[in-house]
Image (cartoon, rainbow, N blue to C red):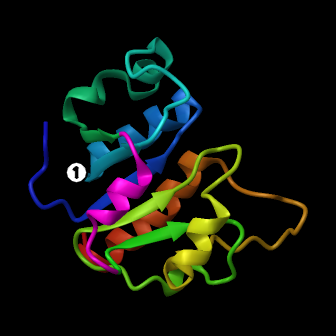
Amino acid sequence: MQIENPALRIVLVEPEIPPNTGNIARLCAATRLHLVLVGKLGFSLDERHLKRAGLDYWPFVSWTHEPDLESWLAAQAPHSFHLLSTRVPTPYTHMPVTWGDALVFGKETAGLPADLLRRYSAQCYTIPMAEPGVRSLNLSSSVALVTYDALRRVRPF
């Protein structure tokens, strides 16, 4: 199922953990957003854990798999994507999101590449955390938090 002109696109760069991707796919189905999986995946798309996490929702997920991040970036309009990382200072609440934008998240173990964050530094955002000893939130939790805030701003429920 492909959604025409989705409010947002959720982009996962080299996701590694099937249940995270399955949960995010379920989120995309529930909110009618498009999911883009980019690069080498840490699992097979038919892996039972991935399908189990998404349960019966995979037929409702609009998704594509792009083989290469640089090619995907080159095809995007300037400023139509936002990079989320723990290694940048600007809170996601300052993200100037508009209809059709992409929210880009890195892999669970390493996040997005440092050179990408430098190249697009004006398009990088983070989820602030009060406890400096906590490195990051779970990927699917992070995607849900940022996605619903962005949706609130582009498409009131």
Within the image, what quadrant is residue 7 found in?
A: bottom left
Q: In which quarter of the image is the C terminus?
A: bottom left
Q: Residue at x 75, y 70 (%)?
A: 129
* Magenta-colored stretch includes residue 115: no
Is residue 75 covered in magenta? yes
The amino acid on which the numbered mark 1 sits, given as a three-letter code, is: Arg
Q: State the image coordinates of residue 68 (x, y, percent, origin top left).
A: 40, 46
Which residue is at a point 13% across and 49% down the rendered structure image? 3
Q: Which of 88 and 155 is in front in this view?
A: 88
- In the picture shown, does residue 74 fall above or below 111? below
Query: Where is residue 79 shown, x and y percent of the image?
Result: 35, 80
Q: Quadrant of the N terminus?
A: top left
Q: Which of 121 and 23 is in front in this view?
A: 121
- Give whichever of 3, 145 is nearer the camera: 3
Task: Classify mark 1: helix, strand or loop.
Answer: loop
Q: Is residue 28 left or right of residue 100?
A: right
Residue 38 lies, with reference to residue 113, above or below; the image says above
Q: Is residue 92 visible?
A: no
Q: Locate residue 50, reporting x and y percent.
A: 45, 23
Label 1 Cα neighbours within 10 Å, binned few <14 / some 14-19 / many ≥20? some
- Would residue 2 be seen by someone viewing this image from the given angle? yes
Q: In this view, does 105 lie to the left or right of 37?
A: right
Q: Where is residue 66 in the image (x, y as percent from the top left)?
A: 33, 43
- Range drawn in magenta: 67-78
Q: In which quarter of the image is residue 114?
A: bottom right
What residue is shown at x 57% (from left), y 81% (from top)?
A: 121
Q: How many labels does the image show?
A: 1
Q: Name the residue under label 1.
A: 32
